[in-house]
Image (tube, rainbow, N blue to C red):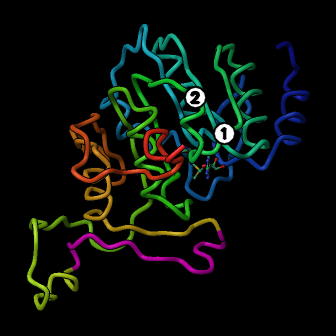
Amino acid sequence: MNLSQDELREKIAALGPWFHNMELNGVRTAPEHFLGDYPNQKFKHFSSAIPADLTGKSVLDIGCNAGFYSMEMKRRGAARVLGVDFDEDYLAQARFAAKVSELDIEFQKLSVYDVARLGEKFDVVLFMGVLYHLRHPLLALDLLYENVVGDMLVFQSMQRGSANVGEVREDYPFFDADHFDAPDYPKMHFIEHRYAGDPTNWWAPNAACVEAMLRSAGFEITAHPEREVYICRRGAPPELPGAVYPQHRETSGQ
Ligand SMILES: C[S@@+](CC[C@H](N)C(=O)[O-])C[C@H]1O[C@@H](n2cnc3c(N)ncnc32)[C@H](O)[C@@H]1O
């Protein structure tokens, strides 16, 4: 793509506002980001927890936004990178950024609730910064386990509340309720209206809740390289059946 710096600046402005601050041929997409140089700064804290060489691997980036992580995975040699998001404006940014950066990445409009439609499992799935934007977060994790995570899940969620993780027992007697008040017990705060001005912030889990939800959906946490980031492996199927949507063919009664 042969654009002058002025043309590039104009195109980037026309595609904005951007959530991902990336440098495209010397032009920054979101230099005034409220989180600083985001997600560059965050990625530095966990990039080494993801294999440096992804040669031959397939990667799915769910809620890819402008494609920062999709592009980083492609730079690691992944054979195939698919970025999905349900927002066309972000997908347009991602397609442009990948084109300017000469990276062969596929971007598709898809909601996380519809990942079954992809009909394949990926070696690495990124599910970063999406969980707390969903009205049905556990359903999304169940669907990822059932349909797309072949091996590794790279997960991130905003967290609020205690960063401590207490022991969760298998069971508690009915009249034993003190543990619910412990800050390190799994808790997810429901946001009825807005948080940080954003009506799509539905939930704010604490660290114990994030870990419990991942385990409950069948993921085994293998590393916790950054406060909000977890590297997981697909573990044994959860004890109780997970996603009930879309209905399983064998249980649909048809
Ligand atoms: C906070 S951004 C995170 C972007 C990127 N994954 C990251 O970590 O920097 C949340 C992204 O999730 C997308 N998103 C929210 N709900 C979604 C859904 N149901 N299906 C697919 N993408 C969704 C938004 O459009 C947005 O691009």
Picture residue at 20% right of the left edge, 72% below the top: 184
Q: Which residue is mark 1?
A: 110
Please identify the quadrant where the C terminus is shown: top right
Local secondary structure at mark 1: loop
- Crowding around mark 2 (Cα neighbors within 10 Å: few <14, some 14 to 19, many 20+) is few
Callout 2 amino acid: Leu
Q: Name the spot of residue 120 as percent of width and height, x first.
A: 49, 24
Tell me, for residue 26, which label it has, or none.
none
In the rendered view, tell whether residue 245 sits above or below residue 60. below
Q: Name the spot of residue 151 as percent of width and height, x first.
A: 32, 27
Considering the whole magenta stretch, tell me its main secondary structure. loop
Give the mark nearer the N terminus: 1 vs 2: 1
Residue in front for this viewpoint, 8 or 158: 158
Among the 4 quarters of the image, the one containing residue 117: top right
Residue in front for this viewpoint, 212 or 37: 212
Spatial CA span between label 1 and label 2: 9 Å
Residue 198: within the magenta? yes
In the rendered view, tell whether residue 56 sits above or below residue 39. above
Q: Which residues are magenta?
A: 183-199
Q: Name the spot of residue 143 as percent of width and height, x first.
A: 46, 44
In the rendered view, tell whether residue 98 sits above or below residue 130. above
The outermost residue toward the front is 254
Q: Which residue is mark 2?
A: 118
Answer with left or right where residue 13 lies relative to residue 188: right
**Any atom of ligand 1 within 8 Å of the CB at mark 1?**
yes
The reply to whether discs 1 and 2 touch (Cβ–Cβ < 8 Å) is yes
